[in-house]
Amino acid sequence: MNYLAVDTSGKNLTIICSQNGKTEVYFDKECGVNHSVKIMPAIEETAKKVGFEFEKADFFAVVVGAGSFTGIRIGVATIKALCLAYKKPCLSVTSFDTIAYNKSSGKNLAIINAKHGSYYVAGYNGNKVDLSPRFISEEELNELKEDYVFLSYESIDGIQTEVVSVKDGLLNAIKEKHGQASTDLEAIVPLYIRKSQAEEGR
């Protein structure tokens, strides 16, 4: 399975290149708001390490959110451009997948801190979504404690969660979902659960 995957949905920047059984992972834990500057050099650096041949990719993959509005747009635009240039299908992975796919069984709630006492969440039973992605308050989050194990990619003040690896989760999600790669690039869109701050202010 030959592919290139990109995650720009949070503070981190993850690039995965896999070719002929050799996989290289680039991970910048604190990329912050520099995705637009770092993404192409990181792709080139990671691809070079495995001798990745873009024209031989089976698909390209991108994390579509939820998360940083700007970061998500950068990742989606970059991967769509590669899909168009090399005429390859695209695999869409959610930020929740990159958290939940660290566990292969049980009922787990993938949590992303949306700040100000609010959270983006999605519930999984094994690798199947059983609670659709949504934006909830801390009170609503606490009501889910009895049903799910809480997972997140970083510690969250006031919330007890198991911190997991988004890069490992992305690798696992791609292994599980690669058959869902689509040539319909119009279907690859950012997962925005709520409007951006700028849009809400209009």
Image (cartoon, rainbow, N blue to C red):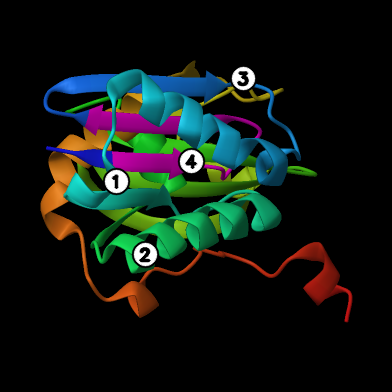
Lower sequence index among marks 3 and 1:
1
Instruction: Please rate how many residues cluster around mark 4, counting C-alpha atoms within 10 Å: few if below 14, some from 14 to 19, many from 20.
Output: many
Dot in front, 3 or 2: 2
Residue located at (51% from left, 56% from top): 78
Q: Which amino acid does label 2 sit on?
A: Ala
Dot in front, 4 or 2: 2
Secondary element under disc 3, as helix, strand or loop, is loop
Which residue is the extreme one toward the right? 201
Disc 3 to disc 1, how far (Cα)?
36 Å
Q: Which amino acid does label 4 sit on?
A: Asp
Residue 186: quadrant of the picture: bottom left
Disc 2 to disc 1, how far (Cα)?
10 Å
Secondary element under disc 1, as helix, strand or loop, is helix
Dot in front, 1 or 4: 1
Lower sequence index among marks 2 and 1:
1
Find residue 155 and name its label.
Answer: 3
**Which residue was labeled with disc 1?**
54
* Residue 72 screen position, x and y as percent: 58, 54
The N terminus lies in which quarter of the figure? top left
Secondary element under disc 2, as helix, strand or loop, is helix
Disc 3 to disc 4, how far (Cα)?
19 Å
Asked if the residues shown at circle 2 and circle 1 are in contact, with their CB atoms under 8 angstroms apart, the answer is yes
Left or right: where 94 falls relative to 14 = left
Disc 1 to disc 4, how far (Cα)?
18 Å
**Which residue was labeled with disc 2?**
85
Asked if the residues shown at circle 4 and circle 2 are in contact, with their CB atoms under 8 angstroms apart, the answer is no
